[in-house]
Image: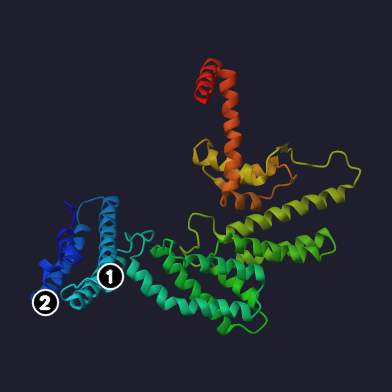
Amino acid sequence: MLKYELKTLQEFVLALAPEQLAAFDAGRRDLPLWKASVESESVRIKDSWTTAIFTAAKDNIIERYIQYHQTGIIEFADLLQSYHDILKGDNEVSIPFCDVTVELIRWFISQLFELLNYIERFFSKYFNLESKIPETYRAISFQELSDIIKELQRQLSDMQVEILLQSSIHDFLNSIVLPQTMITFRKLIYLKEFLKELSSVFIQTERGDWDNQISMALLYLNYNHLGFFSYYQDLVNLELADADNNEQHIEILMRYLSIIKAAQLKPAFSYNPEWPTIKLMLETWLNDEIATRMLAGKKDFNGAGAKHSYKPEKLPLNISVAQLALIVRLFYESGHFAIANIKEILRFIALHYESKKQQHISTGSIHKEFYSVTQVTAAVVRDMLLKMVDIINKRYFPVIFAVCAIIGSHSII
């Protein structure tokens, strides 16, 4: 029978609350013995976890059991940090043996970190990477990383890295250091590897090749950030603009496609794990652009006067690509599509629909809009859906609609 193992540890934590310090009496308490009790309890907890994974419990039960304890330990660490901040910041109230208690709290937090490290090391299969890191751990980590972040940002500027590429990197680094940004273990691991890889570029790369090497590093890191995706699209489009004919366009696109296909991705690693990989995003867009130009070339070959050249039948819509993407997403998340392959759904939509401003919707563009819905787009689509509901009410539920209208008019009066 799996049970909660942190009850005694919780009592130790609560004993250090500022309002409990008089009862705790750090001055006369046998602190070495108290520390030994905490350490002994930590050993017992580790043994209980180890025993748990060899029980007959199902894997998903053990996963919840380990992650429940992981969450509890993080909460204890944050609670102790709040005690620490109160004691260090309270200069007006005299608290007995305040300095002794502060040091004890720091020691206790280190013991909790050791328990978290134990879970990460020996139960990595069950460790919840999406869990919020403790505030103390966050403060320590960003204190260590702040100089590296500043140095990387300085190098990007000094080496005159392309502005759009710089912007996509700055967006990530500037947002992750904001106090209101929730930092998970996954985000912190990604940030450390991100800084390590990009910093190494400026050490190993010959001057003048920064943009290419940074792009390859970001591909390896699966930096599926929309800013980087847009930068790569612009990079390709700039070269296409200098080409003389459709055949050269296809050669350029094929070359970039071969680069993307050959790029290695760091396994199980991504900026946003909920989005497609950057390789898939770019490959989809490049394949779509190649198909479009090959179709255009086929039309040119058949002659301008050909009446029966192939053209996919498309339904024109009076909405934008972003609005269409959100409607598709609502259908997808509501389970109204009979298939679950969103890549194929978006490909079909791009092939058979025209937006208000685009006769040809690329799969890459609808992919991008599908995963980056703005509040403005959501508001417009919501108004569209409300108008549709209004039409249904008027046409198919006239009595209810009339009653609602009467009630509404009376409430206004």
- CA gap between label 2 and label 1 equals 26 Å
Number of numbered labels in the structure image:
2
Q: How is the image coloured?
A: rainbow
The answer to which quarter of the image holds residue 166 is: bottom right
Which residue is identified by label 1? 113
Q: Position of residue 364 (x, y in %)?
A: 64, 53
The amino acid type found where label 2 is placed reads: Gly
The amino acid beneath tag 1 is Phe
Residue in the picture at 66% in, 45% down: 321
Label 2: few (<14), some (14–19) or many (≥20) C-alpha neighbours in 10 Å = few
* Secondary element at image label 2: loop
Query: Residue 231 vs residue 7: left or right?
Result: right
Residue drawn where x is 81% and y is 66% of the image = 242
Front tag of 2 and 1: 2
Per the image, label 1 sits on a secondary structure element best described as helix
Name the foreground residue: 283 vs 171. 171
Residue 232 in percent (x, y) is at: 66, 64
Relative to 293, residue 311 above or below: above
Q: Is residue 397 left or right of residue 284?
A: left
- Is 338 placed left or right of 15 in the picture? right
User: Where residue 270 is drawn, which disc sits there?
Assistant: none
Relative placement, left or right, of 214 versus 306 is left
Q: Residue drawn 57% across and 69% down?
A: 169
Badge 1: how crowded within 10 Å, few (<14), some, or many (20+)? some
Q: Nearer the viewer, residue 277 or 370?
A: 370
Q: Residue furthest top?
A: 399
Q: Which residue is mark 2?
A: 27
Query: Can residue 219 be seen by looking at this rendering?
Result: no
Q: Where residue 155 appears, x then y in whole percent?
A: 58, 80
Q: Is residue 277 visible?
A: yes
